Amino acid sequence: MTDIDLFDIALFDYEYVYKNFLWLLLIIPLLVFWYLYRENSRKNFKNINISTLDGFETNQFNWVQLLRHLNFFLVLFAIAFIIIALARPHDVNDIESYKKKNIEGIDIVLALDVSGSMLAQDFKPNRLEASKRVALDFIRERPTDRIGLVLYEGEAYTKVPLTNDHRILVDAFNTIESGEVAPGTAIGLGLVTAINRLETSTAKSKVIILLTDGVNNVGDIDPITAAQIAKEYGIRVYTIGVGKEGLAPFPVQSPFGVVMQNMPVEIDEDLLMEIAELTGTRYFRAKNQDELLEIYNEIDQLEKSKVKVLEFKTDPPEKYYAILFWAIAALLLSTLMNYTLLKSIP
């Protein structure tokens, strides 16, 4: 729970979420003008005859009149502070709101093949869904890392740039589908796109986890050339081939609807091994979901390095609590005065 300092009210040092509410403060001078006009009008009231003037001494201090003025300004104070509270003041200068700190972590980009062959059902329910689930488990186990996501088939694109906000990654994984771009498997393009996400990283340890179930058959960039670029940038590329040996059931469209047809599993393991060796890592083969999970667990043991990360709380410190407290206190005091010292008897 946030500690509330009732005397910490530095209105001019705050940032306001709903600044337009502050325009309502213009009613304060209008109320003051109305009050002064009313008080002046009272002086022009006709006098009435009373039986005696005893007690009306010259220059007698009128404490009731003073309390009435005080009561009005208590109400003004309360109205002004309620308006300011509605504007939601935040203290963005609070050193606890945002700070740089060193945490253990690395920068990782997941390069995921989403080509049509990833719909093969030798993994349950298919390779793509199994790969998504295991990758999500991997992300949850690395809360301090910056992680990005690149998808590729005939073309490649960045789904999520490097981020510490893993909720964005989880949401992105839930929307991944095959067939969003041109068909094919462009491993070289996928790798270069992932490299582009890491080339400006200041992390000492930069890693790409490239997963595919096929062979490079489209794209203008040779995968080995891409691996050499990764090596120049000091990026390590772990490669994973998914798919069992022999044949695997693929969904195929037919005149009678979608039918399952066994098709050969083709993974260019020599290429994936060469990419891993060039960048100083390993190639893994996953023939089922359990093996894929073990591979990610092994990669999870990567050596971590110090990475400077900007940590920003979701919400800077709220400062309306104390303001609202004093507004309510002023209203309560005004009400108490109306029912006691200023109470009139009919």
Image (cartoon, grey):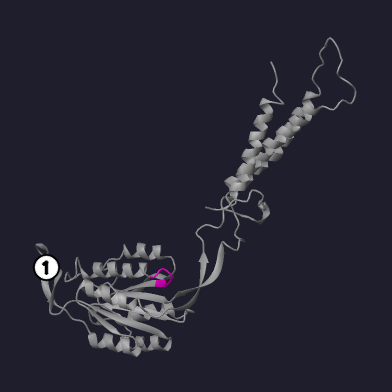
Which residue is pictured at 60% across the width and 46% down the height?
A: 85
Q: Is residue 222 visible?
A: no
Q: Is residue 296 left or right of residue 309?
A: left
Location of residue 221 with respect to 255 vertically, above or below = below
Residue extent of the magenta highlight: 142-147
Element under disc 1: strand
Q: Residues within 10 Å of mark 1 (few under 14, many from 20)?
A: some
Q: Quadrant of residue 280?
A: bottom left
Q: Which residue is farthest left?
A: 256
Going by the picture, which residue comes out furthest to the right?
Answer: 58
The quarter holding residue 44 reads top right
Which residue is rendered at x = 23% and y = 80% of the image? 285
- The secondary structure making up most of the magenta span is loop
Q: Quadrant of residue 234?
A: bottom left
In-front residue for pair 253/187: 187
Amino acid on which the number 1 mark rests in the picture? Met
Question: Where is residue 283 drawn, in percent x and y?
Answer: 28, 84
Image coordinates for residue 58, horizontal then vertical, percent: 90, 23
Image coords of residue 55 (percent x, y):
86, 18
Q: The C terminus is located in which quarter?
A: top right
Residue behind mark 1: 260
Whether residue 103 can be seen here: yes
Residue 344 falls inside the magenta stretch: no
